[in-house]
Amino acid sequence: MPEQLLFAMEVTLNGLMAGVLYALVALGFVLIFKASGIFNYAQGVMALFAALTLVGIQQGQVPFAHLINAIFGTEVHHFPWHVPSIIAIILAAGVMVLFAWIVEKYILQHLIGQPDIILFMATIGLAYFMEGFGDIMWGSDIKTLDVGLPQGMNMAIDEATYNMFGYGFFIDNLDIVATVVAALLVTSLVIFSQYTKQGRALRAVADDHSAALSVGISLRFIWVLVWSIAGFVALVAGIMWGAKSGVQFSLSLIALKALPVLMLGGFTSIPGAIIGGLIIGVGEQLFEFAIGPMIGGATQNWFAYVLALIFLIFRPQGLFGEKIIERV
Amino acid sequence: MFYREAGDFKTSYRDDNQTFPIRLDRMGYYILMFVAFLVVPFFINDYWVNAVFAPFLIYAIAALGLNILTGYAGQVSLGTGGFMAVGAYACYKLMTGFPEVSIVIHIILAGGITAMVGVAFGLPSLRIKGFYLAVATLAAQFFLVWLFNKVPWFYNYSASGQINAPERSVFGVIVTGPNTEAWAKYMICLVFVVVLAWVARNLTRGMMGRKWMGIRDMDIAAEIIGVNPLMAKMSAFAVSSFFVGIAGALFFAVYLGAAEAGEAFGINKSFLILFMIIIGGLGSIFGSFAGAAFMVLMPVLLKNVLVGGMGWPTDLAAHFEFMIVGGLIVIFLIVEPHGLAQLWRLTKEKLRLWPFPH
């Protein structure tokens, strides 16, 4: 086979893997949007915050150490223990549930009935707040996240493809793990929303708020639930991205990448989020590979947005979104 | 007691429709103009112009522009930073390409070029609405910044990829470049602000502004009573981008002197200006100024108190600033969605009845 084609295949595969990670973030958006009609800009910062919390707990950091040191002139940094990964993950998930409860009680409660765009801007404010809060709580240095996920090149694939084509593909083990985790996550979410009582209530709320209220479903509980789930999804996304490129500020920027994914897939569709993520992942890698060198490179910065923009002109509701019907 | 409209008789429609119908407001406005033009320039120094006045005035222009688009016409944009970059680079290319033409004309032309770019990126607004549009404007933000970083023609093939403002003068006074005096910097910004605020005020209360507000409040109803949505949205994008472009040109040429697209006009700038109009008040000229003043003064104040007063490390203070800004946005949206402008309005309302509120 010609070499260019092999390269393109490898790029496509890696793009698919990156797309899975985008889809993970996009998933959190879709969950919240479906249940409460809120476009949660803070999803990316939630992923960052969750990852920071995880690393902080794992390494036994003292929360607010910098603040305490600055005020009292002390020198505290770490507790003298390390927490095992699995317990740290559970604790971090607990923090995200607490966060969901606080957001519901102190922000969403007071904004019921406001126009969507006000809610959107409120989540931008929330994102800024969380960014500052996360940094004050755990410090702003780049942290490495290690929960024992396999990393590095996958030898088996390298060998298999070498034997087949005479050229070994470079696929990161972490990406494979991420794909498996994402598949598991989506499956369990689907099972949860189809076969449990809370899941049914969740779908009812997504369909119609007032009808759901009238049959005795507690909106507040459902919102806390859905923000908790989104927090958990953010934690998973944070672990994957954090393990890949370190826990740092740029993690919150992947949230922005998830926006075009959503626009492609449609804001209300979970399969849409996955497929949109894959399309963007593959699309931007292939575009950079094929056309990038001709126009100066680094096209990943904007390719996703422009693709989504062009796409929206032809199909404003996205690939799988519900048709937008305007009533007067 | 002293703030009354009693005795202020209006004898013509012209009087009745003036911007400041109450005499005290009018006097306040004239005094403000007097102080701004004839007092401040004599006392201003480099610290004050660079830390407070120049950013405040320039951001006020950008906030006015975004407020026209978001507050009056109801189209949310997250691409303000990108449009400011267009203004800055257009101004730079004009300044270096036609050195004999006055810088004032360059800045206005830069605004015009930005208006055209704004209209191009505003076209999707006919098909998509709300936050779909907000996300679409992100495309403008990222694409434009990338373009200015990657195409060397825009920065005249300079090795550092930066653009540097050459020295230019207005009426023999140097206004750009490193040798600019503080008062000259201040004055050129002030003149642009006053003229543009006057334009914005008169556009928004005229036919155009009413069309924008119709589209904002309910686009379908507005279309039925005869507002052309294409013209209304495109004109909002054009006027808004014109303002933002001028702000970008001033920001680069007068305030910074040297700029790099990704750093000076990144996504954070878009959010900063969006926050200004949320805190100041959506759909209010005064709000744009109040918001810009707030967002410029608060970091300066915080830095002085936390770093200077309490001796905290700067990075901690910066994180604190993020928290405070984010928290304030949420609080404002919950407590007073119309921002500082509404608080100001309420204060004036109370003051008119004071001290006998019944």
Image (cartoon, coloured by chain):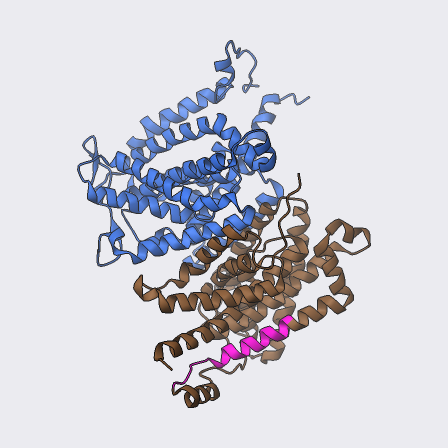
Q: Position of residue A65 (x, y in %)?
A: 51, 66
Is residue A33 in sight in this rendering? yes
Tell me residue B213's x, y (percent): 54, 33
Can see residue B325?
no
B204 and A103: which is toward the camera: B204
Residue A175 sits inside the magenta stretch: yes
Which chain is brown in the picture?
A
Is A287 situated above or below A9? Answer: above
Q: Residue at x 47, y 75 (%)?
A: A13
User: Of residues B191 and A236, which is closer to you in this image?
Assistant: A236
Q: Report the residue at 55% width, 46% height from top.
A: B129
Magenta segment boundaries in residue numbering: A167-186
Location of the N terminus of chain B by quadrant is: top right
Where is residue A42 drawn, in percent x and y?
Answer: 55, 57
Q: Which chain is blue?
A: B
Vertical position of residue A36 compared to residue A13: above or below: above
Q: Nearer the viewer, residue B223 or B316?
A: B223
Q: Residue at x 65, y 68 (%)?
A: A94
Q: Residue furthest right?
A: A215
Q: State left or right for residue A163 relative to residue A197.
A: left
Q: Determine whether A156 is above or below B211 in the image.
A: below
Residue A78, percent across and down? 52, 74
Residue B106 appears left or right of B17: left
Q: Main secondary structure of the magenta part?
A: helix
Instruction: Pick the quarter of the image with the C terminus of chain B.
Output: top right
